[in-house]
Image: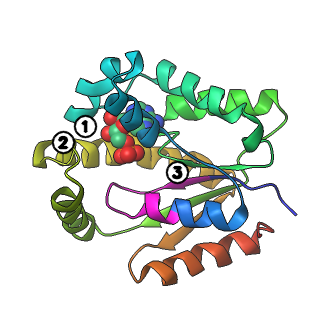
């Protein structure tokens, strides 16, 4: 069996958060979502939250050094020893380098990268719906456009790196929640990653 050290990647509105939780639950591993960590800190008004609030609200990226340090701390906790699912990190090539260095220092590497593909129109529609349902501060039209453009220019290129390593499964992210979860589960099982 291959240890599930996973990453889920997809544009905003692709459903990666929801699918990440489902997959991690099934495998019994923690989800490490940098977006969730930042939002919780903003909500609680911590020092970190105060530092990143304006950046997040504008749809910009938090500096790599800060983000990578948070992820390293989280991955060092005991519950991540048997595997983890990263959601939203790494998000650019600099962060890929940071994560590689950290994992290599432990003799590890990512064992699977799930690329959730959703057409641009569909993800914009889903984001508009989420904006009315959840009222996220960064779901304004301007911040959404910024995040989608950062995804295309900075995040999509990380997939080329992982693709060269042969760890990427591209999953069609259009369909029912259950159907998409099943597609991901099947792709991971083919890599020897299963509950
Ligand atoms: P998400 O929930 O993944 O869409 O993240 C929400 C926001 O948190 C992003 O728009 C960024 O401002 C910030 N953020 C989340 N993950 C990262 C990351 N890996 N690097 C930099 N900023 C991040």
How far apart marks 2 and 3 lie (CA) works out to 23 Å
Q: Is residue 185 above or below residue 133?
A: below
User: First in sequence: mark 1 or mark 3?
Assistant: 1
How far apart marks 1 and 3 lie (CA) works out to 21 Å
Q: Is residue 71 above or below residue 141?
A: above
User: Is the residue indicated by label 1 positioned so its CB lies within 8 Å of ligand 1?
Assistant: yes
Residue closest to the far right = 1
Mark 1 crowdedness (10 Å alpha carbons): few <14, some 14-19, many ≥20: many
What are the residue bounds of the magenta stretch? 7-19
Picture coordinates of residue 75 (x, y %)?
A: 68, 35
**In the image, is residue 164 part of the stretch drawn in magenta?**
no
Quadrant in the rendering for residue 68: top right
Determine the secondary structure under disc 1.
Answer: loop
Frontmost residue, 1 versus 191 = 1
User: Is the residue indicated by label 2 positioned so its CB lies within 8 Å of ligand 1?
Assistant: yes
User: First in sequence: mark 1 or mark 2?
Assistant: 1
- The residue where tag 2 is placed is 143
Circle nearer the viewer, 2 or 3? 2
Circle nearer the viewer, 1 or 3? 1
Residue 115 shows which numbered tag? none
Q: Quadrant of the C terminus?
A: bottom right
- The residue where tag 1 is placed is 59
Mark 2 crowdedness (10 Å alpha carbons): few <14, some 14-19, many ≥20: some
> Residue at horizontal 27%, vertical 65%?
123
Mark 3 crowdedness (10 Å alpha carbons): few <14, some 14-19, many ≥20: many
User: First in sequence: mark 2 or mark 3?
Assistant: 2
Residue 159 shows which numbered tag? 3
Determine the secondary structure under disc 3.
Answer: helix
Q: Is residue 19 above or below residue 113?
A: below
Picture coordinates of residue 193 (x, y %)?
A: 77, 66
Picture coordinates of residue 140 (x, y %)?
A: 13, 46
């Amino acid at each position: 069996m291959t240890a599930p050290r996973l990453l889920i990647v997809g544009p905003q509105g692709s459903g990666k958060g929801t699918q990440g939780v489902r997959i991690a639950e099934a495998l019994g591993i923690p989800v490490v979502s940098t977006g969730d960590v930042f939002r919780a800190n903003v909500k609680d008004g911590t020092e970190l939250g105060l530092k990143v609030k304006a950046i997040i609200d504008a749809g910009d990226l938090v500096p790599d050094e800060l983000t990578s340090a948070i992820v390293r701390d989280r991955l060092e906790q005991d519950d991540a020893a048997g595997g983890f699912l990263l959601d939203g990190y790494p998000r650019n090539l600099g962060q890929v380098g940071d994560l590689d260095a950290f994992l290599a220092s432990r003799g590890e590497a990512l064992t699977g990268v799930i690329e959730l593909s959703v057409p641009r129109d569909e993800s914009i529609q889903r984001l508009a719906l989420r904006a009315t349902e959840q009222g996220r501060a960064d779901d304004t039209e301007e911040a959404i456009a910024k995040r989608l453009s950062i995804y295309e220019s900075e995040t999509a290129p990380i997939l080329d790196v992982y693709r060269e390593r042969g760890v990427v499964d591209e999953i069609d992210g259009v369909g029912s929640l259950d159907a998409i979860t099943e597609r991901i589960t099947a792709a991971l099982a083919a890599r020897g990653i299963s509950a």
